[in-house]
């Protein structure tokens, strides 16, 4: 967790280094920008530099203070995560350990309700309770730093303070304790109180370029270049999302299913197609949505390849040959219509329409659109719209 671990964000890093060098560290910072762009990584590198015993604009990485901040056990560095009211303290500790091991990892309750199961979803809301602000923060803020030069509080996803908590926090901001530095991170700054916003120095984080994410996946996470390039393009500027995708073993397998579904939709080999649709239908509604999004990505690659040829920046960059072969196989395909059809299928799946029925209608319509111009919509009988299937 030093500046060298931060990917890109040069402007933000230089601003913070200048603040340290000129001894004009602000009392409160707001790091805002999309998920996975490195807000937490920068916050931790900044905290470490602030506490480093060398006192320069870069942490030495060797002194006891650097060491403690890296392991998130420094008594003057508090990293807070919003959590559900019944969160297990052991779970919270494990998440902080995960953060110290990899500052870009998805360890928060919001995006990762269960550390063990990446696909697990939860209805429980993670938030900052007012009691926590008063008990944990107010107390510790009223004392001088115990061993560091500053008291640093990193409040991740700070927009998850409810009204009472936000007002309690505002009081802390208004009467700053000695040598206190607050770092708030958020991807939704519009949800913070204007009175909090106005008291922070605001630093914007841009989404990461795909090639930087790709390089990080190869250099830091040991991924092969081909899959790394594909994942980086699917990750939308978020290294964290790319890491999440690498953990998702089903993703690569699902990409194979997508190509198979399109091939069979074209050839209309009914027996095989029926079996494949049944197989996909059994995977449940959430995974089917994921597969349909992959179908969209594949068709968009076909569009790109048709217009730009080998120069196209494909999502499935490691499958460029397969994309080229595919587009040669369906020279008259109405790709625009295919995109609309898949989007319509996604909506139907959202609305709980029977999965197999939707997939069957989709494959028939895609088969027609791959042969030539297509203007129809997916046909799903009205009577079936109300029939939620038993797998979803
Ligand atoms: Zn140091």
Image (cartoon, grey):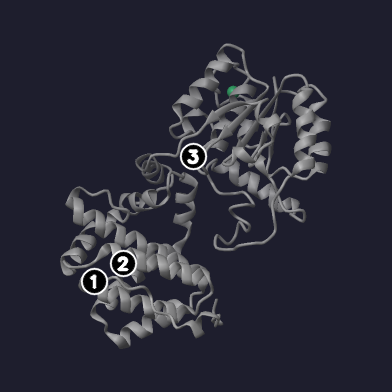
Q: Earlier in the sequence, mark 3 or mark 2?
A: 3
Q: Is residue 315 left or right of residue 334?
A: right
Q: Quadrant of ligand 1?
A: top right
Q: In x, y percent, where is residue 194? A: 67, 32
Q: Which residue is mark 1?
A: 370
Check disc 3 and report its element: helix, strand or loop.
Answer: loop
Which disc is residue 37 wearing? Answer: 3
Q: In x, y percent, where is residue 225? A: 32, 49
Can you name the residue that lies furthest to the top here? 22
Relative vertical location of residue 9 with respect to residue 321 in this rendering, above or below: above
Q: Which residue is mark 2?
A: 338
Q: Please tell me which residue is depicted at 74% across the width and 27% down the height of the picture.
A: 173
Q: Residues within 10 Å of mark 1 (few under 14, many from 20)?
A: many
Q: Residues within 10 Å of mark 3 (few under 14, many from 20)?
A: many
Residue closest to the eye, 6 or 52: 6
Q: In x, y percent, where is residue 334? A: 24, 66
Check disc 2 and report its element: helix, strand or loop.
Answer: helix
Relative vertical location of residue 42 with respect to residue 238 in this rendering, above or below: above
Q: Please tell me which residue is depicted at 57% across the width and 17% down the height of the picture.
A: 19
Cα–Cα span, label 3 and label 2: 33 Å
């Amino acid at each position: 967790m030093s500046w060298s671990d931060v990917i890109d964000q040069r402007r933000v890093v230089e601003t913070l280094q200048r603040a340290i060098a000129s001894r004009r560290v602000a009392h409160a910072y707001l790091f805002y920008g999309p998920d996975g762009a490195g807000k937490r990584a920068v916050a931790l590198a900044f905290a470490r530099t602030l506490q480093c015993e060398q006192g320069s604009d870069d942490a030495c990485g060797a002194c006891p203070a650097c060491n403690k901040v890296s392991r998130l056990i420094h008594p003057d560095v508090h990293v807070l995560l919003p959590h559900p009211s019944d969160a297990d303290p052991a779970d919270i500790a494990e998440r902080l350990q995960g953060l110290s091991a990899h500052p870009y990892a998805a360890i928060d309750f919001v995006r990762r309700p269960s550390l063990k199961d990446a696909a697990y979803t939860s209805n429980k809301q993670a938030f900052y309770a007012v009691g926590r602000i008063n008990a944990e923060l107010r107390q510790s803020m009223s004392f001088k730093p115990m061993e560091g030069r500053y008291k640093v509080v990193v409040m991740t996803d700070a927009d998850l303070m409810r009204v009472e908590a936000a007002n309690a926090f505002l009081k802390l901001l208004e009467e700053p304790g000695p040598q206190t530095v607050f770092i708030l991170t958020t991807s939704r700054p519009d949800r913070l109180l204007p009175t909090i916003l106005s008291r922070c120095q605001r630093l914007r984080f841009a989404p990461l370029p795909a090639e930087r994410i790709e390089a990080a996946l190869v250099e830091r996470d040991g991924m092969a270049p081909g899959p790394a390039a594909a994942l980086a393009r699917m990750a939308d500027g978020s290294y964290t999302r790319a890491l999440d995708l690498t953990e998702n073993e089903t993703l690569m397998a699902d990409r194979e299913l997508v190509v198979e579904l399109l091939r069979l939709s074209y050839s209309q080999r009914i027996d095989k197609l029926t079996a494949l649709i049944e197989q996909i239908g059994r995977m449940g509604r959430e995974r089917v949505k994921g597969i349909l999004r992959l179908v969209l990505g594949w068709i968009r690659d076909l569009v790109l390849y048709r217009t730009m040829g080998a120069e196209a920046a494909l999502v499935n960059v490691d499958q460029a040959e397969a994309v080229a072969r595919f587009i040669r196989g369906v020279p008259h395909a109405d790709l625009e219509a295919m995109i609309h059809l898949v989007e319509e299928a996604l909506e139907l799946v959202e609305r709980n329409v029977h999965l197999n029925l939707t997939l069957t209608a989709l494959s028939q319509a895609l088969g027609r659109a791959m042969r030539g111009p297509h203007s129809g919509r997916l046909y799903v009988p009205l009577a079936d719209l109300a029939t939620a299937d038993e797998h979803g």
